Image (spheres, grey):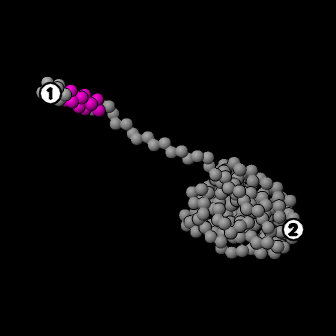
Amino acid sequence: MKNLVLPLICFCIVLFTACKNTNENQEPQPEVVTVDMGKKKTYEAAESDVTFNDPKVADIYGSYIQLKTALVNSDAESTATSAKELINALENKGDEEELLKAAQTIATSSDIEVQRKEFVLVTSGLEKMLEGAISSGVIYKQYCPMAFDFEGGFWLSNSKEIYNPYFGDKMLRCGKVDSEIK
């Protein structure tokens, strides 16, 4: 037994010394963490139960909802495409210069933050257009107090459920129903 103890102790000393020397010669390695984000969820707009007195306003509102949904999905390319559809609908109506200009800025930008900033103007212009244009149904005016460094921002929706176009997935549910447009 004594004959086995001494070689075992020597083996342990050599092992610890070898391991210690190997660690000293190596540079520290950064920790790598792999996170599987999975596929990004795409959000769809709720069905609308609103009817309008003017079919041109209905087309404009439908294009607006597509634009808002693209912003909720934080998809700059789809946002630009939806803005082009809104431009076509606005040109068919004819008398909405400020709204048209904001939609053109969105359509020509590939920066989602620029698109979101202009969306505030689109929403404001559309809200004015909707006054007296609804024959039945409800549109929900929603508000996020945190948008644009706490300046806040409004948008219009087919449902009470909050899908924030100013933050997308970062703060999808940030907001509240401010009022109803009937």
Residue 80 position in % (x across, y down): 72, 51
Is residue 24 among what the camera can see?
A: yes
Q: Could you say which quadrant of the image residue 100 lies in? A: bottom right
Give the vertical position of 24 relative to 167 (above or below). Answer: above
Q: Of the residues shown, which amino acid type is indicated by label 2? A: Asp
Q: Could you say which quadrant of the image residue 164 lies in? A: bottom right
| Residue 20 on the magenta span | yes
Give the vertical position of 10 relative to 111 (above or below). Answer: above
Side of 147 relative to 158 (left or right):
left
Q: What stretch is highlighted in magenta?
A: 10-23
Side of 142 relative to 61 (left or right):
left
Q: Nearer the viewer, residue 69 or 42?
A: 42
**Looking at the rendered structure, which numbered label has been put on residue 54?**
2
Question: Outermost residue toward the front?
Answer: 1
* Residue at the spot of label 1: 1
Residue drawn at (32%, 31%), measured in percent from left and top? 26
Q: Main secondary structure of the magenta part?
A: helix
Residue drawn at (79%, 54%), measured in percent from left and top? 85
| Residue 145 on the magenta span | no
